[in-house]
Amino acid sequence: MQRTPVIISTDPGVDDIVAILFALASPELEILAYIPSFGNTDSESAYSNILKAYAAIARHLEQFPGDATRFPNFSPSVRPILARGSDGPLQGDLHSAQYFHGRDGLGGITERHPELTPDGLEYVTLTLKSGMEVVVDLIQSRPSRTITYIALGPLTDLANLMEVNAGLIREKIGRIVCMGGNLDVPGNTTPVAEFNFFADPFAVKKLLIEDEMLLPLDRFIMLPLDITTSHELPFPTYKERVDPHFETSARPSIPSAKSPLVHFTSSFLEQARVVMLQFGKDAMELHDIVAVWCAISNPPVLDNSLAVGWRTHNRVFDVERTGELTRGCLVVDRRADEGAYALGADRSTSSVMPALVETEDAPRDLKGNGVACCTRTPGPSVLLEMLLSRVWGV
């Protein structure tokens, strides 16, 4: 099997860590580096959380060495680079998603589970180089158009990279897979914005919308909330198939009752469950996991085609950068779309399409043919079974 080398830009983060475990358990990938940054939590906690994940797998394999084949990307002899990413956005205020992920990014496991220490240093390669320098080195060291860059957090590091090395990246990157944005569905951090794009809308503008095209959009796949939200890990399923003792942070995970890996995942999922139940859902949405799945299924190819079951549609949008209520909102010009005025339960029967001549600006194509946004995957049930099998062996 020819493996896809990947660089993972991430802000772990509960679903980021599950996505990283999924990548570690996927033989189709070769993990070259992690670039942890601000986002769901602060950059230092994000850095530490990757080490916690590696330490958990190491402890698990000490007790269950036969499970080593389940993690083809975990080996002391092949250590991905861990390089620090950005501490904040290109411009504007610094925001985090600690309301969901907790102060440490993993639902408060630092206080609730002090036994889960970040001691996985021997399984990664530490460096004093910046994340941007590491990405440049790796891309220059590999054949052209073989590396996939997976963006699971804010796009700040990618924007900084393109600002200085746009020519190199356009020439040599294989694919860029980005989890972010929302087009026709509500946001998840505000009513109108997805968190990654909310965290640094200036980076989104620079990369995807400004007149000077930085990214090779023919090799860019965006996975917005529109496609990722339907992919879930139901907590009752997790309890039934992975951890029969799983409850919530009110009844914390006990290490003696389960394997080290299951204890680790239950220790942060238990608080995620509390938060999701407040929103009326007993499941974790697999946003970042869908992005890793996309990279697994769609390695770089010359014609940029996608695997069976995957589909994208090019969308044109702008992004609000400074709005009091709309920061990170993707603005789609629907004025020329008669379907936007279809009658429905929440519309007045007298609604009619307004005359465009009365508006200040005419509809315009903001960015060529737009951005390829994923509109179809092989299905939520396919991903769920793949995730359960690979990460937890069930």
Image (spheres, rainbow, N blue to C red):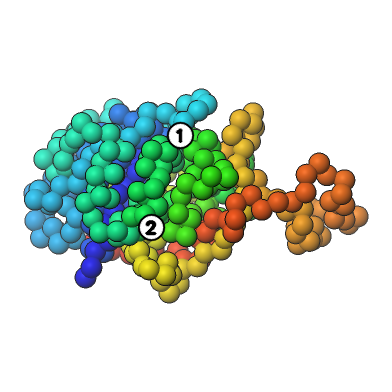
Q: Earlier in the sequence, mark 1 or mark 2?
A: 1
Image position, residue 187 (x, y; %)? 58, 44
Residue 54 rendering spot, x and y as whole percentages: 19, 44
Label tally: 2
Name the outermost residue toward the front.
Answer: 167
Q: Which amino acid type is marked by label 1?
A: Ala
Residue 22 in the image: state x and y as whole percent: 29, 55
Q: Is residue 178 left or right of residue 333?
A: left
Q: Which of the two residues, 143 or 63, is positioned nearer the viewer here?
A: 143
Q: Secondary structure at mark 2?
A: strand
The quadrant of the rendering that contains the N terminus is bottom left
**Amino acid, disc 2:** Arg
Say if 287 sits above or below 113 in the image. Answer: below
Q: Circle 2 is placed at which residue position?
A: 175
Measuring from the top left, give residue 370's x and y in whole percent. Answer: 58, 56
Q: Who's the residue at 33% across and 55% down the image?
A: 172
Residue sitting nearer the eye, 230 or 133: 133
